[in-house]
Image: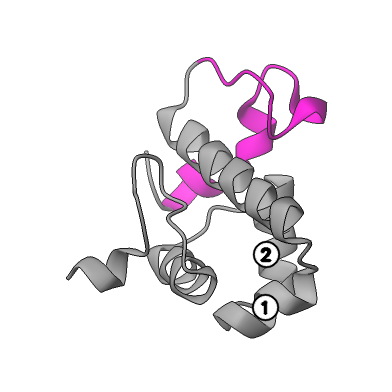
Amino acid sequence: MTGGRGRSVAPRELAADPENWPDAVIPDHPQARVVQAIARALARHVDQEGLGLRRVAALSGVNRQAIANLLAGDSWPDVATLSRLEDGLGIGLYPGSSGPGSRHC
């Protein structure tokens, strides 16, 4: 379930072992697994490029705390946040995407 009470629990809390986020096993929540994959892809890019949260925020226009919350699995990112991150970093974050979504429209 999306929206409403379905988002009242953080994605990481739906994992069998939340302390291992973003590599934790999430047995029964496909939406949380999507957020997990996005967080993994973002963390990998940040690490590979040696970017800090402030730099990611400056490049994307996404609030630094929102980025930190996404990486930690504490929030459900919306489409605008994901699009801004993809466009600002020039990468695809959504599982299966090859590049920023708005550039394919």
Identify the residue at horizontal 38%, vertical 46% (top origin): 2
Identify the residue at horizontal 46%, vertical 38% (top origin): 34
- Extent of the magenta region: 4-27
Give the alpha-carbon distance from disc 1 to disc 2, as whole Å. 7 Å
Crowding around mark 1 (Cα neighbors within 10 Å: few <14, some 14 to 19, many 20+) is: many
Give the camera-side residue of 34 and 5. 34
Left or right: residue 12 versus residue 36 is: right
* 94 magenta-colored: no
In this view, the mark in front (1 or 2): 1
Q: Is residue 9 visible?
A: no
User: Are circles 1 and 2 on residues that touch, CB within 8 Å?
Assistant: yes
Q: Is residue 59 visible?
A: yes
Identify the residue at horizontal 57%, vertical 46% (top origin): 41
Label 1 sits on residue: 57
Name the spot of residue 29 as percent of width and height, x first.
47, 26
Left or right: residue 54 versus residue 26 is: right
Residue 96 image label: none
Q: Quadrant of residue 30?
A: top left
Give the secondary structure at mark 2.
helix
Residue 67 image label: 2
Name the spot of residue 91 as percent of width and height, x first.
46, 60
Give the camera-side residue of 52 and 13. 52
Give the camera-side residue of 89 and 39. 89
Name the spot of residue 75 as percent of width and height, x first.
62, 53
Q: Given the image, on which type of amino acid does mark 1 rest? A: Ala
Identify the residue at horizontal 71%, vertical 52% (top origin): 48
In this view, the residue farthest toward the front is 49
